[in-house]
Every structure is written in structure tokens, then in C-alpha cells.
Amino acid sequence: MKTKTTKCIVSAAAAVALTLTGATQAAEKLNIYCWSEYIPQDVIDDFSKETGIKVSVENYASNEEMLAKLGAGGGSFDIIQPSEYVVEALVKEKLLRPLDKKAIPNLKNIDSKFLNMSFDPGNKYSVPFMAGTVGIVVNTELVKDDIKSFSDVFKPANKGKIVALDDAREITAWALLSQGLPINDMSDANLEKVKPVLANWLPLVKVFDSDSPKTALLNGDVAIGIVWGGEGAILLQSDPKFRWIIPAEGTHLFIDSLAIPKTAKNVNNAEAFMNFILRTDISKQISDAFPYTNPNLAARKILTEEQIRNKASFPSDEEIAKMQVFRDIGTQGSKVDELVTSLKAQ
Ligand code: N2P
């Protein structure tokens, strides 16, 4: 009996030792592949300081760029940041790893509105990181017209004054909206319908930029932008001459999540990082740098009134209710890419 107990203790100790060795080995690295201008460098540095985990970060400017790299087997990533329709597609293709929720207790900080969404019921594979929309920013010192819609932006008079996101799915969605068509119906017939619209619009754009579309507006290179909400929010903070407009035709609500690819090698570290950035103070730090719609309710409670009042960061419930969310469109995605690429090259 006594011997048996001792043996048990010994094997328990061995198990602990094994786990520790495993943890020490895994604690060395974490490879993140995320949207540009979404996770501040000081957050990454603080995580490394706290955990000793060495983090490498690569950025992408569109979901399609990220998927192309993953699909081509380029890089080995422990965390990616897909948008809703991409989570949906990756789950379908069994390319994500189920999360160990016990390792992510700070999930409790997320607003329940952003949990259990249709692209990942029960959040088996994804943790909401940031949400937001796409809207119009006008430099009112340079443009006197009362711009209300995508169609107002893409008028011949604005040729050479526009910065737009460099994102085929986004651009095509704006054209569909301008025709009163749903943004997820990217059938061949609808692509044919928006082709002439895009053929008129694209030559008017001076700068295509998804990484930092605010830059061309800040330096006066352009006067109108169609930009991510967080970029719009930074512009509104920077100068009252910038006005934010939710396009009259409607717009798109995105929810970008954190997920672990099946092929990840540092899974524990990935979950530790997810838990870290869901911490109230860290999530606030992220909002301070990149003022998108933060789904972290605990962090939202400690944002300043000015941050919460920024309409580009936090659209009203009424505005959100009118926004559409992208769904997986399967193989039509590559046709959308081809359409926009060919028209841009004209
Ligand atoms: C962050 C870009 C926002 C991502 N720079 C839109 N899904």
C-alpha cells in the first residue's frame, strides 16, 4: 500500500516535470500573422517581458492575402486574425484548431453580443478581437460638397482626390450596395452588373491603401477616403476638419477574431497570448492605439468619454443594425479578385 502511494507520487512528479519541460520548450516562441496596425508593438513587448515568450509578428492587409500565404504553406503561424467570413471558411475546411477555453478565462470580458456568432457557434475556434465598419472620411477644408454616399464619392469631379481600401471584396461590396444589391450575393450575374460601376469608379482613385489609408488624408495627398473605422477615428481625433460619414447605401460590419491554425506549433503560447490581450488593461491599450469597436466590454468601461463618443469607433446601435456582415462566398472570391485587379489595370 505504502509503496503504491510512493509510486503514485513519483509518477505525478514525473508528469509535472514533463509538463514543465514541455512548457519551457513551448515558451520560447509565438508566431503571429495579423492585420497591419491592429496589435500595438508595446503590447507585444509587454507580453514577451511578462512571459519570456519571443514573439514574431508578420502583417497582412487583407484576408485574401493571409489565405494565400496560409494556403501556399508560407510561414508557420500560431495565431491568425481572420474576419468572420474567413473563420466560417476555415472552420468548414477544418483548418483551425479548437480552443482550450480553460486557458482563456479572460473571454469573460467579451460583450456577449460578439460571442456565439453564426460563423463560429459557441466560439469553438475563435475569439473576437476587434470589430468595426467602413465609412467615408471627408477633409471639409478641401471638399465643400455634402458627401453622403459611395456614389457621391465616386463622382468624376473627385478624380485624383480619393484614397480607398485596397481590398477587392470591400470595393465590390460598395458597388453592390450602390446598386441596392446584397453584399453577399457575388454571383456571376451580380458581378456583371457591378462591372461597369467599378469601371467608372476605380480610375478616380488616387491611392489604394489598406494598411494606413489615413496617411494620404493626413498629408493632404487626397481629400476623401473610404477607410476602416479605426482609421477614421484617428483622423477625427487628429483634426476637426475631418468628417465621418456612414454611406447612405449601407455598409459592412466586420468582426475580426483570433484563431489558431491546425498547423500551429506553439498552441499553449497562442492561448496565453489570447488571454493576455483580452485583459482589461491590455485591451484598453489596444483601443488607445487602434480605436476600432472594441468587443471587450470590460475595457470599453474604462475608455474615456471622448473615445466612446467617436462615431467612427463606435457607430450607434441603429447604424449597426443596418450593417451587413460578410459571409463565405466560396470560389466566387477569386472572381471578385480578378474583376477588381483587371479593372485597376485598365
Ligand atoms: C486594421 C485593419 C482592419 C481590418 N489595420 C478590417 N477587417
Image: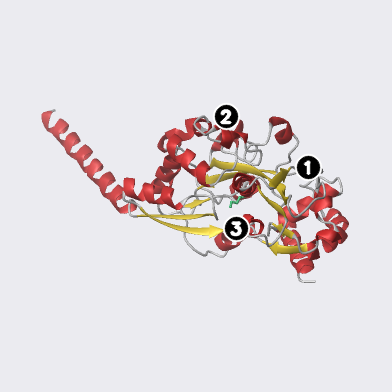
Q: Quadrant of the C terminus?
A: bottom right
- In the image, 136 versus 146, the foreground residue is 146
Q: What crowding class fits label 1: few (fewer than 14 Cα within 10 Å), some (14-19), or many (20 or more)?
A: many
Q: Is mark 2 within 8 Å of ligand 1?
A: no
Check disc 3 and give the amino acid type.
Asp
Which sits earlier in the primary sequence, circle 3 or circle 1?
3
- Give the camera-side residue of 333 and 113: 113
Q: Which one is earlier in the sequence, the residue at label 2 or at label 1?
A: 2
Res 112 label: 2
Tell whether circle 3 marks a residue whose Cβ is less than 8 angstroms from ligand 1.
Answer: yes
Circles 3 and 2 in contact, beta carbons < 8 Å: no
Residues tagged 3 and 1 counted as in contact (Cβ below 8 A)? no
Q: Are marks 2 and 1 in contact (CB under 8 Å)?
A: no
- Marks 3/2: CA–CA distance: 29 Å
Can you tell which quarter of the image residue 307 is in?
top right
Could you tell me which secondary element the residue under label 1 belongs to?
A: loop
> Dot 3: what SS?
loop
Residue 94 seen in render: yes
Residue 232 left/right relative to 284: right
Name the quadrant containing residue 316: top right
Q: Name the residue: 78% across, 51% down.
A: 174
